[in-house]
Image (cartoon, helix red, strand yellow):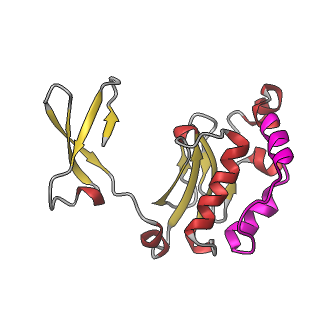
Amino acid sequence: MTLSDASGKNVRKVVEPGSGDEKGGWVTFRRPSGQEERVWLPHKLTFEEARNLPDAYAIMEGEFGYQCYLTAPLRDIRCQEPELRKLLLDLDQICCDDLEGRHIYYQEHKPGDYISDGMGGAKIVDDAWIHPQLVDFGLLERIREVLSGRRSRLELNPEEISNLRARWRNPEENSKYEGF
């Protein structure tokens, strides 16, 4: 696995057999020069692990974490992980449409916590938090239906996606949502 450090130089992750690094902890990185460095990586929860925790949240982001689409407590999510991934795909098609930049992850949080990102961040609330622009697009009910398991996708046609994407990228419309 190749990652970039803060200086922008590529480093290679070296997993030590039996170290448990895949579950978080100390990981050795080897720079192209051969120099090794140990860093702490937090444990990333799987969907199944998070499902069993009372304070676990699903967090959907695009643009490599620069844009948060939603946060939702797993205790309230009734759909399965494939449907969550489809929802992320649908939201990202509207917003960024970047295959590599979108991701969903699971973390423990308490209401009142804040997810920091470059576009105003996101809130951890008792219920699902959905980016206000997506709500203004009229997608609130469809998103809630996917999270509840009553719908498997947002089911937007290509024209709807194109129109919403144009609105998402419109600087005038976007300015309403800066630092919400």
Q: Confirm whether the magenta stretch covers residue 178.
A: no
Q: Tell me the quarter of the image containing the C terminus.
A: top right
What residue appears at the point 81 percent right and 47 percent down from the top-left corner?
A: 158
Q: Quadrant of residue 88?
A: bottom right
What residue appears at the point 16 percent right and 25 percent down from the top-left corner?
A: 33
What residue appears at the point 54 percent right and 53 percent down from the top-left corner?
A: 113
92 vs 118, left or right, is: right
Q: Please provide percent x and percent y for residue 18.
A: 15, 62
Q: Please provide percent x and percent y for residue 134.
A: 76, 48
24 vs 34, left or right, is: right
Q: Between 73 and 146, which is closer to the camera in this rendering?
A: 146
Q: Is residue 178 above or below residue 43?
A: above
Q: Is residue 130 above or below residue 93?
A: below
Q: Quadrant of residue 48?
A: bottom left
Q: Is residue 165 above or below residue 108?
A: above
Q: Quadrant of residue 30?
A: top left
Q: Between 109 and 63, which is closer to the camera in this rendering?
A: 63
For this orientation, the residue located farthest to the front is 158
Q: Tell me the quarter of the image containing the N terminus.
A: top left
State the predominant SS element of the stretch in magenta.
helix
Q: Between 41 and 95, which is closer to the camera in this rendering?
A: 95
Q: Confirm whether the magenta stretch covers residue 148.
A: yes
Q: Please provide percent x and percent y for residue 104.
A: 53, 54
Q: Is residue 26 above or below residue 175?
A: below
Q: Please provide percent x and percent y for residue 76.
A: 63, 73
Magenta extent: 137-166
Q: Between 157 and 41, which is closer to the camera in this rendering?
A: 157
- Give the number of marks: 0
